[in-house]
Image: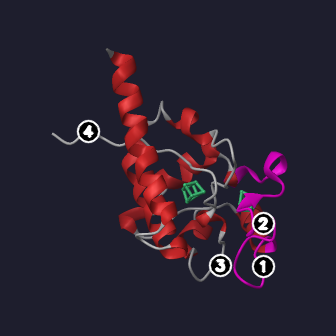
């Protein structure tokens, strides 16, 4: 039986920080009206979040990023169908060098599969399906499974 992969956010990605409403209609709909206003105000002319540093692929306001960029809310959006049916990833999880999302999500295994599918779709769309970011993401979610298995023994 194939081991279940475990969702991890990786550094140097930020694919979900491309907020272009034309690409994220479902994600936008999953937000409340106030969040939608905040979201729309963050969309830059190129479709990326105005707070995303496309060079370093980091969030420039990480500590102050909106609630819908934070992992606990991300979980709600995942389950709300923001990425349902392999459609679109919900609002940005945000890129950060320490990837703190991963530990927080370990307790939400039921959402791993959906979250991983959403990230893969985002990464494929922004960085390519066979690029370095996708390979790093795949290694990360598989490594997370091995890590858990080791600690269960
Ligand atoms: S697409 Fe996934 S891995 Fe990439 S920054 Fe967003 S949550 Fe993290
Ligand atoms: S995590 Fe930061 S860069 Fe990404 S969408 Fe949120 S505010 Fe913008």
Q: Quadrant of residue 92?
A: bottom right
Q: Is residue 88 visible?
A: no
Query: Mark 4: few, some, or many residues within 10 Å (few <14, many ≥20)?
Result: few
Q: Please tell me whether mark 1 sits on a helix, a strand or a loop.
A: loop
Residue 76 percent coordinates (x, y): 55, 48
User: Which residue is located at x 66 percent, y 72 percent?
Assistant: 19
Q: Is residue 142 left or right of residue 97?
A: left
Q: Which residue is mark 2?
A: 53
Q: Are marks 4 and 1 in contact (CB under 8 Å)?
A: no
Residue furthest toward the front?
A: 132
Q: CA distance from mark 4 to mark 2?
A: 35 Å
Q: CA distance from mark 4 to mark 3?
A: 34 Å
Q: Earlier in the sequence, mark 1 or mark 2?
A: 1
Residue 24 percent coordinates (x, y): 57, 74
Q: Is residue 40 left or right of residue 150?
A: right
Residue 3's disc number: 4
Is 18 rendered above or below residue 66? below
Mark 2 CB near ligand 2 (8 Å cut) = yes
């Amino acid at each position: 039986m194939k081991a279940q992969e475990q969702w991890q956010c990786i550094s140097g990605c930020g694919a979900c920080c491309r907020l272009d409403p034309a690409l994220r209609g479902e994600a936008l709909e999953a937000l409340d009206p106030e969040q939608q206003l905040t979201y729309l105000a963050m969309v830059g002319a190129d479709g990326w979040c105005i707070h995303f540093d496309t060079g370093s692929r980091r969030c420039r306001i990480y500590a102050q990023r909106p609630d819908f960029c934070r992992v606990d809310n991300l979980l709600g959006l995942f389950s709300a169908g923001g990425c349902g049916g392999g459609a679109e990833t919900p609002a940005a999880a945000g890129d950060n060098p320490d990837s703190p999302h991963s530990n927080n999500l370990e307790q939400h295994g039921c959402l791993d599969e959906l979250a991983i599918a959403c990230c893969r779709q985002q990464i494929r769309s922004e960085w390519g399906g066979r690029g370095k970011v996708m390979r790093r993401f795949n290694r990360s979610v598989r490594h997370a499974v091995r890590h858990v298995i080791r600690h269960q023994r």
